[in-house]
Structure formats: C-alpha cells, structure tokens
Amino acid sequence: MRKLFYLSVITGLVAACSSEPHYVINGKIEGAASVTFMLQKRGAGKIVNIDSAIAYKGSFKMKGGAVKYPEMVLLSVRDSRMRTSFYLENSEITIAGKLDSLFAAKITGSKTQDEYQGFIDSNKTLSEKYSKIYNEYQMAEQSGDTAKVSQLEKEAAATESEMTRLQKDFVKNNPSSFVAPSILSQLSYEMEGSEIETYINAMDTAVANTEIIKDLKERVVKMKTVEIGQKAPDFTMNDPEGNPVTLYSKIGSKLLLVDFWAAWCNPCRMENPNVVKVYKEFNKKGFDVFGVSLDQKKEDWVKAIADDNLTWTHVSDLQYWSNEIGRAVV
C-alpha cells in the first residue's frame, strides 16, 4: 500500500510538472537529414540562440520552459541562410515544409502565428499590387520613360498609404494581439511620438509590457522633444577638419534643414542632387543645410561630400547607427 501511495505521489508530481506552461516545436522538414536547426531571436541588435536540434529523417523536436509572452523567433539551419520566422508561445507548434523552401513552411499550433498569418493574408492583394508597381517602375526608369516613372510613383504612394491604413487599423482593432507591437514598431518610423503613444495607451496591459513596446515608449520620450513646435536640442560634432560645430551656431535668420545622411545610404545619395538644387536656388534667400553624417569611415564621408557637391556645413562623430544625436532624436 505504501508503494502505491509513493507511486501516486510521483505520478502526480510528474503530471504537475508537465502541466506547467512550456513550448514544444515539432519539425517535419523534407530533405533535412542530419541537419542542425537553431531556434533564435533578435535582441539588442544581435541574434540570440534559444535552442537547437538535429533532424533525423526530416524530423526534430525542441522543448523549452515557459515564455513570458508570444514573440517572433527564427528557425534557422546552422551555417546557412535558410530560415523561417514564426511566433513562439506556450503551446505545441508544428513546422512542416521543405528544406530548400524553409521560408514557406507551414506553421500550426500557435494562436498568435495564426493572427499574424491572417494579417499577412489580408494584405496580400495590396502587397502583390505594390510589387507589380515596383517592377514596372524599375523598367520605366531603366528605359528613361519619365512620364511612366512619375505615374508609377503616384500609384506606389497611394498603395503605400492604403497599406499603412490597414496596418494602423489592425493595431487599433486588436489591442490584445501580440502581433500588434511588431506592426506598430514598423509603422513608428513614419509617425509622430504623440501618435505612437496613443496606440500604445490603447493596448492591453500584457501587450504593452512587451520589450518592443517598452523600447517604443523610450523612443516616444525622445521623439516628443523634437516634435513640431519644440525647440531643437543643441549638439556639438566635428566637421571634416576636426573643428567642433554646434547646431545653434548655424541657427539664425535662415531656414535651416538638418539633413541626416551617410555615404553608404543609397536613398540619401539619390536625394542629394535635389537638396543641392534647392540649396543653390534658395541659399541667398535665407535657406541653409546642416549635414549630419552617420558614416564610420572619414574617407568615405569626405569623398561623398565632394562627389555629390555638397557645399554646406557637415559634421559627424563617425559612430554609424550609434551617432549621438541620431540616437537621441530617432
């Protein structure tokens, strides 16, 4: 009788442990014989390994403890660019597909992943439309058809606007979805701090406590300091000759454009001729430009200034994305 009692206690403990929140990933990937799969996530600007497993005849299994909340992760093949992304949460998740098209694997068992896939599907028509416009735009640009280019730019802008509206609607209408933070983060680069804050305040508490939203809250504080109507924060950086220059030393009776750019930034370089044109036309009427570079190499920065004929004042701390003022206002 005593043995039966101990056995029942042990069985109860095992059952209790197995009922604790946890995740299980079952992989069924055709063509993956003796392949090592890595479960990873992006954090603090780098890839962090969470788990790994070796596939046997295409099958593998990963099991881990409780995750605090659903979070986008990567399933990658070690030493390869093959990967797929999905939302990891405390459930049994199945990933089925083929090794040579892992990005298209079917993911089931994650409620949050289902929500995300539903969002992707609802945007599919617009995404396909935008891709078609982009392809036609490239062809028109290569052939020198300026009229077609102009028309396609307007169509692209209208399509982008509609895509943005759908994204904002999702965030607004799904305050309890853990997909919403990622979408809001993508949108935030085109939004004012006050608008971002409005969306955050409407989210459920659990969603608002995710790392993505915590980071966005910090950005909102910074962004509010540079919103329209606020006084721009002063800063000091060196020009190409090593002389310190303050922002406020450039502010006077003129209209000043503070232009964040870099030699490695292709869109910036494509826009430079337009800035040069406006500068030449309006400089004598009170318009000036203050260039702040996010470059790393001084020689690249200086060469780009000369090549693009940027004749206004330039400064940089040559710290790339860690540029002091860039991190403070973006």
Image (spheres, rainbow, N blue to C red):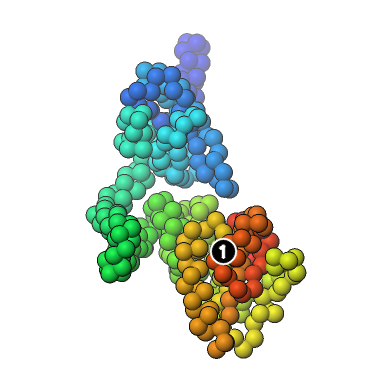
Toward which corner of the image does residue 264 lie, by quadrant? bottom right
| SS at mark 1 in the image | helix
Observer able to see residue 47? yes
Give the total of numbered labels: 1
* Above-or-below relation of 240 to 212: below
* Above-or-below relation of 283 to 120: below
Residue at 32% across, 63% down: 144
Q: Residues within 10 Å of mark 1 (few under 14, many from 20)?
A: few
What percent of the width, then of the height, locates residue 200? 46, 63
Q: Nearer the viewer, residue 179 or 37?
A: 37
Observer able to see residue 155? no
Q: Nearer the viewer, residue 5 or 270?
A: 270
Residue at 54% across, 35% down: 49
- Does residue 220 appear left or right of residue 129 in this picture? right
Residue at image mark 1: 307
What percent of the width, then of the height, locates residue 56? 40, 18
Residue at 69% across, 71% down: 235
